[in-house]
Structure formats: structure tokens, C-alpha cells
Image (cartoon, rainbow, N blue to C red):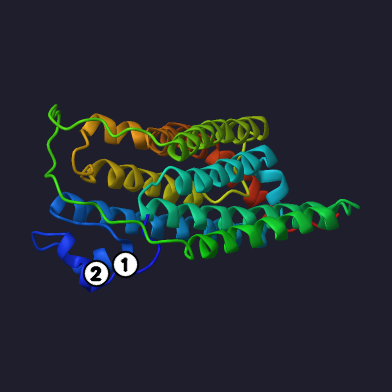
């Protein structure tokens, strides 16, 4: 995985008129429209993920009930999945855009958890607030330092050549897993499981409350869009030289399952927003009504 600019001098390794800025920035050899679309969709997915959390931050500041609206297990499962996703992306040599996105995931999750505990301890002060804040700060520092440490290592050797995209091809062989990639694959699989199970507590919380008040739908709508584009960006990418389509998909399978599988559960949460919107509107209206004098 290339974490530093490869340099124009090595651009000759990537033939057939590839877009040079993609090579310089991401170390990716965008040989045709498939690769260019993969990078483009990956960048748009990062923008969706980056924008998704801000509506929830604003909603939390307005309502002040984030600790009631969001399930703690949902947030813990989310940050657990994102943390495993980040570690797995490093170890399993995933696409650079996948790793960049994983770094942002964890940072955004930490802000969300901080807001959750802020409103929880604001209403009910607890002696645990200081230790929890210390743990969050430690995780934040670790996430920020990890990419910097990885950047000091040797630059990965770019791909030796290019093979056009051939669906259902059988000639190329299977790329074997290295020990490091096996560990990354396992961690990525754990990440997918955490992603899938993180939605279940939130679905249950919404059902018990019969309400989605305090939750910004933009959070889930943008995450759904981001996951769709993220999955497409991985699927559109050309395999490495000599690697079959099946081998390529196998190497990226945990991340595809985690990304596309969560779409189904987020769709259920979207249905809950539709089912409970009349109840939420009535509750909001009653809160705005002034008390009549007796």
C-alpha cells in the first residue's frame, strides 16, 4: 500500500496513459474507465461518510437527548467495527481509499461517543466520566498516530503490470494470502460482524421507544449512500496482474459484506423513520404548545 507519493519517475510502470494524479496521490494505476470510476466513487463515498455525522452532531446539540435516542451498543458496535476495519485494512493490503476512509470512520465515531457520554453525564453525573474521557482521548491519539507511523516504512512496490477487466475469466490464477493478509482478513471479518450486529440494538431501541426522535435521518441516508458507492468502488476496480476476479473478490469479501450487508439493516431503520414520523411529529408539536393558564 502506497502511503507516500510514488513520484513521476516511476509513472512509466503504469502504462497506457493512466491519469497521473491518481498514481501520484493514491499509488493506484487507473488504466481504464473502470479504475477511474472506482477512484471517483471512492472519493464521493468518503465525502458522504464525512458529511453523514454532522447532521447528528447538530441534532444532538439541539435536542440534548442523544443518550436516549441512540443505543450505546449501537455506538460501541460501530466503533468496534470501524476499529477492526482500520486494522484489517492495514494488514490485508486493501485499497488506499479504503484505509483513508477507515481512519475517518474511527475519528467520527469517537466524536459521536464523546457527545453521547457528554449528554449522559450532564444529566446524571458519574465518577466514571473522567476515566471514560481518558480512554476516548487515548483511542483518538492512537488513531491519529497510526497512519503517521505507517508512512515511515518503505513504500510498497507498485503493481508490475496491468490486465484489463475480464468478468468470469479463468486464465489468471489465485493470489495467495500472506500471513499478514490472513490476519487482516480475519480482523476484517470480525469488523463485518460488528457492523451487522451494531444496527440491531438501534433497531430495538427505536422499536421500544416507538420513535426516532433525536436521531438525524441524514446520518443513515448518507451512510447508506456512502456504503453503496464504497462497495461499487471496490467492485469496479481491476484485479492485480495475474489475479482472477474470484480471487480479487475473495480478498475484499469482508469489506464488501460489511459495506453492502449494512445497507439492508439501515433500510429497516429507514422504514422505522417512516412508521414513527407521525408519532414524532405529534410529540414535537405538543412540546411546542405553550401551557394554558389555569
Please tell me in which quadrant of the rendered image residue 42 appears.
Answer: bottom left
Residue at mark 1 to residue at mark 2: CA–CA distance: 6 Å
Q: Nearer the viewer, residue 167 or 158?
A: 158
* Residue at x 14%, y 55% (from the top left corner): 31
* Residue at x 8%, y 59% (from the top left corner): 16
**How many numbered badges does the structure rendering display?**
2
Please say if the residues under marks 1 and 2 sit with CB atoms less than 8 Å apart.
yes
* Residue at x 31%, y 67% (from the top left corner): 25
Circle 2 Cα neighbour tier, 10 Å, few/some/many (<14 / 14–19 / ≥20): some
Give the residue pinned by disc 1: 25
- The quadrant in which the N terminus is found is bottom left
SS for tag 2? helix
Residue 173 location (% of width, % of height): 21, 30
Q: Nearer the viewer, residue 116 or 259?
A: 259
Q: In this view, does 31 lie above or below 237?
A: below
Residue 259 location (% of width, % of height): 41, 39
Q: Can residue 289 be seen in this view?
A: no
Left or right of 166 on screen, residue 221: right
Residue 171 location (% of width, % of height): 12, 29
- The quadrant in which the C terminus is found is bottom right
Q: Can residue 169 be seen in this view?
A: yes
Please tell me in which quadrant of the rendered image residue 10 appears.
Answer: bottom left
Give the residue pinned by disc 2: 21
Q: Which of 284 and 139 is in front in this view?
A: 139
Please tell me in which quadrant of the rendered image residue 7 appears.
Answer: bottom left
Residue 139 location (% of width, % of height): 67, 55
Amino acid at each position: 500500500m502506497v502511503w507516500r507519493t510514488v513520484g513521476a519517475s516511476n509513472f512509466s510502470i503504469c502504462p497506457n496513459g493512466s491519469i497521473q494524479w491518481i498514481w501520484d496521490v493514491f499509488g493506484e494505476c487507473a488504466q481504464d474507465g473502470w479504475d477511474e470510476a472506482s477512484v471517483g466513487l471512492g472519493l464521493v463515498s468518503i465525502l458522504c461518510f464525512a458529511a453523514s455525522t454532522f447532521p447528528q452532531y447538530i441534532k444532538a446539540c439541539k435536542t440534548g437527548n442523544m443518550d436516549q435516542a441512540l443505543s450505546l451498543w449501537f455506538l460501541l458496535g460501530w466503533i468496534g467495527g470501524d476499529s477492526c476495519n482500520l486494522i484489517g485494512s492495514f494488514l490485508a493490503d486493501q485499497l488506499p481509499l479504503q484505509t483513508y476512509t477507515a481512519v475517518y470512520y474511527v475519528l467520527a465515531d469517537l466524536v459521536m461517543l464523546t457527545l453521547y457520554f457528554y449528554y449522559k453525564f450532564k444529566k446524571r453525573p458519574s465518577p466514571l466520566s473522567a476515566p471514560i474521557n481518558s480512554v476516548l482521548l487515548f483511542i483518538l491519539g492512537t488513531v491519529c498516530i497510526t497512519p503517521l507511523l505507517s508512512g515511515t516504512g518503505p513504500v510498497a512496490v507498485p503493481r508490475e503490470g496491468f490486465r484489463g477487466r475480464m468478468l468470469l475469466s479463468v486464465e489468471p490464477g489465485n493470489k495467495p494470502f500472506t500471513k499478514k493478509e490472513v490476519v487482516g482478513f480475519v480482523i476484517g471479518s470480525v469488523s463485518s460482524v460488528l457492523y451487522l450486529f451494531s444496527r440491531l440494538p438501534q433497531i430495538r431501541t427505536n422499536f421500544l421507544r416507538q420513535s426516532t426522535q433525536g436521531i438525524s435521518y441524514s446520518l443513515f441516508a448518507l451512510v447508506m449512500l456512502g456504503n453503496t458507492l464504497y462497495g461499487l468502488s471496490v467492485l469496479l476496480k481491476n484485479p492485480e496482474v495475474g489475479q482472477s476476479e474470484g480471487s480479487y473478490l475473495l480478498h475484499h469479501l469482508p469489506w464488501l459484506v460489511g459495506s453492502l450487508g449494512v445497507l439492508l439493516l439501515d433500510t429497516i431503520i429507514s422504514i422505522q423513520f417512516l412508521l414513527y414520523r407521525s408519532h414524532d411529529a405529534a410529540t414535537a408539536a405538543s412540546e411546542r404548545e405553550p401551557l394554558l393558564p389555569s
